[in-house]
Image (cartoon, grey):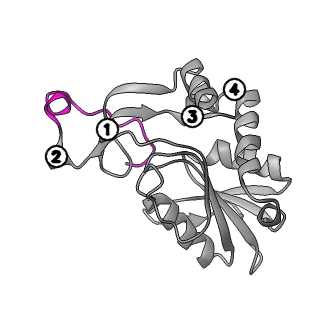
Amino acid sequence: MTEEEILAEFRAADALLEGHFLLSSGRHSAHFLQCARLLMNPERASKIAIAIAQKIPRELRSEIRAVVSPAMGGLIIGHEMGRALGVDAMFVERPDGVFGLRRGFSLEPGTKVLMMEDVVTTGLSGREAISAIHEAGGEVIAAGAVVDRSGGTVELGIPFFPLIELNFPTYAPDELPPELAKSEAVKPGSRK
């Protein structure tokens, strides 16, 4: 899929929002990509996952034995990546503030894992998920995402395969431009 085709999918799903948003990273932005809306259509979600899977080199793709994604945002794309790769998909969640496997999910020691997210901005959730996967015995060999909002600057310590890289500006709370500062931030993400 080309960048324009991907953005057309976001627009068709009313998933490219404009306003004043407080991101999960704690930063502010005038743009928000609502991947849940993008992925609510199973056919579209499958097409997106297949496109991401095709970005992962074949030799690396053949090693992946499980997909693990952070809840909440990564659930749908993680499941679809599991389908695209023909492996189980599970998720880590943080009911007490720290990611971990629950619900009977487990990894055999050394299981090679793809950590899958919807949107990456600073990489904080991804790094936390990777840590939880390692604690559960998995070996994260690659990460994927629908969108890399960092414009290619995020560092996860492993090969990273986003479907699209976008660089919508983000701002610390004390750096807000006047047009954002005059409006209340909406928090549409999954982190409290």
Where is residue 181 shown, x and y percent of the image?
15, 33
Q: Earlier in the sequence, mark 4 or mark 2?
A: 4
Within 10 Å of the Cα at label 3, are there few (<14), some (14-19), or many (20+) other Cα atoms?
A: some
Within 10 Å of the Cα at label 1, are there few (<14), some (14-19), or many (20+) other Cα atoms?
A: many
The residue at the point 57 percent across, 68 percent down is 130
Residue 179 forms part of the magenta stretch: yes
Residue 41 bears which disc, if any?
4
What amino acid type should be assigned to the residue bearing mark 3? Answer: Ala
Residue 175 bears which disc, if any?
2
In the image, taking residue 62 as reference, residue 111 lies left or right, namely left
Where is residue 109 shown, x and y percent of the image?
74, 81
What amino acid type should be assigned to the residue bearing mark 2? Answer: Glu
Where is residue 117 shown, x and y percent of the image?
58, 51
Q: Name the residue under label 1.
A: 29
Real-space Cα separation, disc 4 to disc 3, in angstroms? 9 Å
The residue at the point 42 percent across, 49 percent down is 191
Residue 53 bears which disc, if any?
none
